[in-house]
Image (cartoon, rainbow, N blue to C red):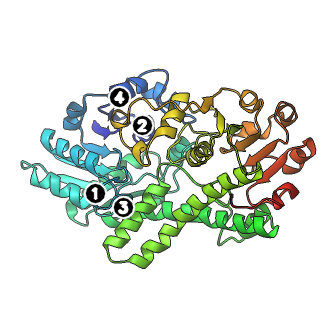
Amino acid sequence: MVKICCIGAGYVGGPTMAVIALKCPGIEVAVVDISVPRIAAWNSDQLPIYEPGLDEIVKQCRGKNLFFSTAVEKHVAEADIIFVSVNTPTKTRGLGAGKAADLTYWESAARMIADVSKSDKIVVEKSTVPVKTAEAIEKILTHNSKGIKYQILSNPEFLAEGTAIEDLFKPDRVLIGGRETPDGQKAIQALKAVYANWVPEDRIITTNLWSAELSKLAANAFLAQRISSVNAMSALCEATGANISEVSHAVGKDTRIGSKFLNASVGFGGSCFQKDILNLVYICECNGLPEVADYWKQVIKVNDYQKSRFVNRVVSSMFNTVSGKKIAILGFAFKKDTGDTRETPAIDVCNGLLGDKAHLSIYDLQVTEEQIRRDLSMRKFDWDHPIHLQPMSPAAVKEVSVVWDAYEATKGAHGICILTEWDEFKTLDYKKIYDNMQKPAFLFDGRNVVDVEKLREIGFIVYSIGKPLDSWLKDMPAVA
């Protein structure tokens, strides 16, 4: 029986291993983590992450050929294939601060593997890592090898949250990169055989190590770039009276461009886009390619610009001050159908409004109050460290209340900001909401989910990203 062990029970490790266990009943899969509460959650009825379809799979396989454990060294020693999906945060100090990936957790995982291994291993990079990480890991393992052979593979994750299980069942592609030596090729075939249990052969792509590592960064950079492109256009639409939805639709009809990822919004979020682009920028700079680095930096700059533009629009519309005013925040996750708040634009928008002394009432379908408070009090990049290494109890921001109902959030509010495109927000009773708000009642739609004309008929002053401006807003300066 082949044994697989995955180090790191997070957003990548958990779902990926659950699906491998489901599709490969002949393989024993152990997911290990040093965090006791996290493993306890994986072994309970309340999993630590929300992902449609994940619950059923875990319940079906857990205890049969899928195990969650804190006995890290035992399972690593027994495994034939070890997936490593530990945090690779952006460095906050030292060389490459603010851009380079911090490989501390990766390195300690590699040293631990070298310490406890008694048989040959295939070590698979699953975390998003900078190009050439494999080489560093290889050096650590071979210098501590005690005669044991290691093969390093890169098998980057292309999951989209909210559809992770679907993506694992029917991936666009599975990418496996390895050494071009006979042993390297053998390792690639061994991992390919695992995926071949359910993925068609033509969807499993094999490359060299560097191509696999770089493909992941490139894919995320291209996706984020599309969002920044459409968001840059949305600012121009507002200035000229064009409608971004119409422009996106027309552009997306071109089959060379396609319609995906062309929705204007308050900005992109998620654990990978910004981190991967910063990483790409750093790698370009290290390789003497400043022009390429500057090109990719712009993608993040436009994203930051879009968030601050949104905050400025809110403040300037409401008589240039939100001090002491209640503002309802609908949605905090970085996109619908996930409870994930990593790098969500809501953090910057909320902090921007709090900076102007607004009182926020926040409602999200999946995100807990504890998480929201932690996010609003955390320094940039802190979220990407294991939870026990994050700052402890978040400073309670008294200007923030977290509620469990959209009507409660909006009661008595001066304005509403929609920051996540949850389906529920399309079908709320906006007449009821309007009646319970202070007048004039403002609605700032950061996700273009509401019917602008209907809301204007009710009486709202509506700002929708990239749409022709309400006559009220035309007289207001766009920059506070």
The residue under the point 62% across, 41% down is: 357
Mark 1 nearby-residue class (10 Å; few <14, some 14–19, many ≥20): few
**In the picture, which quadrant includes the N terminus?**
top left
Q: Nearer the viewer, residue 120 or 54?
A: 54
Do tag 2 and tag 1 residues touch (Cβ < 8 Å)? Answer: no
Q: Residue at x 85, y 55 (%)?
A: 472
Residue 213: image tag: 3
Q: Which residue is mark 1?
A: 94
Q: Amino acid at mark 4?
A: Phe
Q: Earlier in the sequence, mark 3 or mark 1?
A: 1
Q: Is residue 43 above or below residue 314?
A: above
Calculate the distance from the C-alpha at mark 4 to the C-alpha at mark 2: 9 Å
Q: CA distance from mark 3 to mark 4?
A: 27 Å
In this rendering, does residue 397 appear at all?
Answer: yes
Residue 146 position, x and y percent, is 6, 48
Q: CA distance from mark 4 to mark 1?
A: 35 Å
* Quadrant where the C terminus is found in the figure: bottom right
Between the residue at mark 3 and the residue at mark 1, the CA separation in whole angstroms equals 24 Å
